[in-house]
Amino acid sequence: MKRTNLSLLALSVSALSLLSACGGEEAPAPKYNFERAETLPDGYLAELGIIKTNIELTAKLYETMNSSGFSFSESAMLSAGKSFSGSSKQGLGIGAIGSDMVYCSAFGQNQSAMSRMEGLMKTAGALGIAEAFNQTLIEKMASEDTTINKSVLLTKAYLTAKDQLFSDERAQYATFMVVGGWVEGLHIACQTSKNDLSNMDVRLGVWSMCDAYSSVLHMCDVFKDNAEMKAVSEKLSAISDPISKIRNNAKKFSTNDVDELGAAVSEIRGGLY
């Protein structure tokens, strides 16, 4: 049987490996063998690896924007006090908050990062996994120490949640968080770059985020029998056309294309979380 690398699964949970608590008198949920992860399709794990890489590229995109003179946009993010109702939206929301924190940290907006950290911890607590997020580690993301690699710190914070992926239900909520983080990151990227694509690294960063679209959809398809995940997947399908305009024209897509995609993402974003 094909062995699945533990590091692939663990690192991929930078997309936020979360869970919902099991209740009632149900039998204990089966545990994964992380060396093979037999209970999940190999394709799912591969998609997680792609998304993990995309998260790192997104952090670099924000850093490039900052160093290139792009303005920080508080309005591009969720409000610091936003709450989320229900486990699936909490999962989506934690992914989104994580993206917002990376954006804040890349621009040195420590106060905004800290206010969102509080929201992340509150929402993680509502899902019953607050202990998975080391608050001291996350606080370092909001520090003014320019020697700290904020992307690495965020990845470490989320890696502590890997041991929570013990059942299909929990992997399902990890996927909700992957989606939330990707959507929020794409939203921020579109809103902040739609007027200026002159920097080729920024252009490449936006394209890379769009290129992860199919991976996000494939991960959702693993749980297509779940009504909430199916609804999320259907919402994501609404941005297929504007995504394709960018994915299929890496060097030629225009600010108008990014503006169109940004509007489409904004429309589904509110309904997701």
Image (cartoon, rainbow, N blue to C red):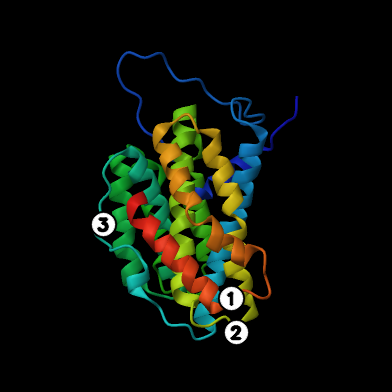
Q: Amino acid at mark 2?
A: Ser
Q: In this view, which residue lies farthest toward the right?
A: 1
Asked which secondary structure carries label 1, the reply is helix
Discs 2, 1 touching: Cβ within 8 Å = yes
Residue placed under numbered mark 1 in the picture:
202
Residue 44 visible in this rendered orientation of the protein? yes
Mark with earlier residue (2, 3): 3
Residue placed under numbered mark 3 in the picture:
82
Residue 273 visible in this rendered orientation of the protein? no
Q: At which x and y percent is residue 158?
A: 48, 48
Q: Nearer the viewer, residue 161 or 256?
A: 256
Asked which secondary structure carries label 3, the reply is loop
Q: Residues within 10 Å of mark 3 (few under 14, many from 20)?
A: few
Q: Residue at x 29, y 56 (%)?
A: 118
Query: What is the number of the mark on residue 39?
Result: none
Residue placed under numbered mark 2 in the picture:
198
Q: CA distance from mark 2 to mark 1?
A: 8 Å
Q: Residue at x 42, y 57 (%)?
A: 98
Q: At which x and y percent is residue 125?
A: 30, 42
* Nearest to viewer (mark 2 / mark 3): 2
Q: Residue at x 69, y 34 (%)?
A: 4
Q: CA distance from mark 2 to mark 3?
A: 34 Å
Q: Is residue 71 left or right of residue 207?
A: left
Q: Amino acid at mark 3?
A: Lys
Q: Amino acid at mark 1?
A: Val
Q: Nearer the viewer, residue 85 or 62?
A: 85
Q: How many marks?
A: 3
Q: Residues within 10 Å of mark 1 (few under 14, many from 20)?
A: many
